[in-house]
Amino acid sequence: MTAGSVRRHIWIAAGTAGLGLVVLVVFWRPAAAQTAGPQATGRGASDFENGRLQFHRTCAQCHGRNMVNSGTTVYDLRNFPIDQPERFIHSVINGKGDMPSFRDALSSEQVRWIWTYVSNRGTPP
């Protein structure tokens, strides 16, 4: 190996390590912050903002980030009737079709937050 190729390998290794550090800093959150309710969003956060954060922790994997999905394999929540909150809450708590029950995973307050987010079509009131 020549001195130039050694330097090149050192720069590549340093760049890779730096990129790894950036990814770690950007994506790392304590486990409690990933699953917690109001503590994760801060005091005074609106129900909508709490709902947005809870939706992205709990629902986005299937229903899409910001509720955007094709609507072919899962329900497109952007089309959910906003005059049917009881139907939404019942589906989340008890499950429906392929959707599992979230009875033991979400508090009634967290479900209400998600409904606020969904019923506003993901747009702050």
Image (cartoon, grey):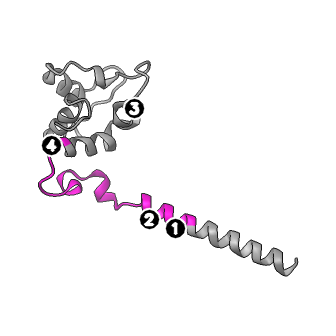
Q: Residue 64: which quarter of the image?
A: top left
The image position of residue 22, as x and y in percent, is: 50, 65
28 or 69, which lies in front? 69
Which residue is labeled 4 in the image?
Answer: 47
Q: Which mark is residue 62?
A: 3
The residues colored magenta run 19-48
Between discs 2 and 4, the one toward the N terminus: 2
Between discs 3 and 1, the one toward the N terminus: 1
Amino acid at circle 2: Val
Describe the element under mark 1 as helix, strand or loop: helix
Task: Count neighbours of disc 4 (C-alpha within 10 A) and say few if under 14, some if 14 to 19, many if 20 or more.
Answer: some
Observer-side mark, 4 or 3, equals: 4
The image position of residue 68, as x and y in percent, is: 38, 30
* Distance from Cα at disc 3 to Cα at disc 1: 29 Å
Q: Residue at x 27, y 26 (%)?
A: 95
Describe the element under mark 2 as helix, strand or loop: helix
Which residue is labeled 2 in the image?
Answer: 25
Task: Count neighbours of disc 3 (C-alpha within 10 A) and say few if under 14, some if 14 to 19, many if 20 or more.
Answer: some
Which residue is labeled 1 in the image?
Answer: 21
The image position of residue 36, as x and y in percent, is: 24, 53
* Distance from Cα at disc 2 to Cα at disc 3: 26 Å
Q: Which mark is residue 49?
A: none
